[in-house]
Amino acid sequence: MESSKLGAAMKVGDLAAAMEEIAPCRLAASWDNVGLLVGDPESRLTRVLLAVDGTLPVIEEARLAGCEALVAYHPLVFAPLKRLVAGTVAFEAARAGLSVYSPHTALDVAIGGTNDVLSDMIGLAERRPLSAGALPLGAGTADCGFGRVGVIQSELLGDVVARLKSALGVDHVLVSGPLDGIVRRVAVCVGSGGDLVGDAAAAGADLFVTGELRHHDALRARAAGLAVVCTLHSVSERPALAPLAAKLAARLPGVVVSCSSRDRDPFEVC
């Protein structure tokens, strides 16, 4: 953040500028909708809430906490809107005077973003992007891209699973592959990883860690000899919120940045 901003009153535009430093919008997939989706860049900013999903409970949490802005990882507005009425999240955010910024795939692709956070939890070394995917031409660098692939010390799949569950704070994940199999090369993709199964296999990965896979993508991975761990979609993404909050707090002096307590995956293990 520019030195001229130090000590000055922060605005929503400063939040957008900070997010642009962390996860430039030009890195987002061509089909995505990222950036400031609701609100006024000139609005005053004292409190920011972070969440994976900008659900109605999260919008209410932000309102009650006196936040002027919400960083919702998944876009609040994605497809063209035909109606903007009471009860929809975009309307309720606007009614609450809440600006909403969504980074989505820009944060996935960016160095230190969602995929790097998940890779750090696994201890992935010598990593590189798994795919350039739908990156706009010329937008990225050699270190930017969808997913990550790298190596860990040779380890039993069952031990990797146990370590990952502990790091994520979950009791259960879905596993395809023998727990006594040896894992050395690992690919990761937060969220829905079906489009990168072929890339993971082509990269020689022993294991693919993602949020979720469709049935036939899981069969395709198994046929390729690729073990899979699925954590649930947003479970794989949520660990990136705390590091993002720290980066924003460092760039927005005087602004209180916190993570939502009401943001959670819609699925629960019973």
Image (cartoon, rainbow, N blue to C red):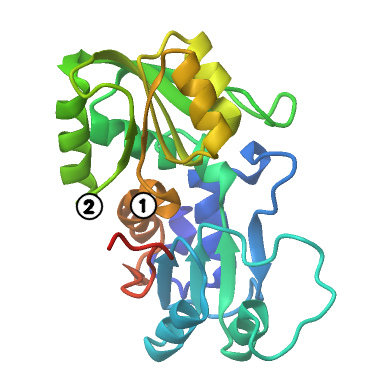
Residue 34 at x, y = what percent? 65, 54
- Where residue 203 appears, x then y in whole percent? 48, 10
Mark 1, secondary structure of its residue: helix
Q: In this view, does 213 lie above or below 196?
A: below
Q: Nearer the viewer, residue 33 or 175?
A: 175
Residue drawn at the location 40% of the way across and 83% of the way down: 61
Examine the rendered structure and indicate whether residue 170 appears above or below residue 137: below
Q: Which amino acid does label 2 sit on?
A: Val
Left or right of 136: which side holds 123?
left
- State left or right for residue 84 relative to residue 152: right
What quarter of the picture does the C terminus occupy?
bottom left
Crowding at dot 1, Cα within 10 Å, few <14 / some 14-19 / many 20+, comes out as: many
Which residue is label 1 attached to? 235
Q: Which residue lies furthest to the right in this view?
A: 82
Task: Specify whether 28 is left or right of 52.
Answer: right
Q: Give residue 41's position: percent from left, percent from top.
A: 64, 71
Which image quadrant for residue 119?
top left
Find residue 142 and name its label. none
> Where is mark 2, residue-wise?
170
Q: Nearer the viewer, residue 217 or 77?
A: 217
**Rendered residue at 51%/64% (across/down):** 72
Q: What's the CA distance linking mark 2 and mark 1?
A: 9 Å
Measuring from the top left, give residue 26's x and y in whole percent.
Answer: 67, 40
Left or right of 87 on screen, residue 154: left
Residue nearer the viewer, 71 or 263: 263
Contact between marks 2 and 1 (CB within 8 A): the answer is yes
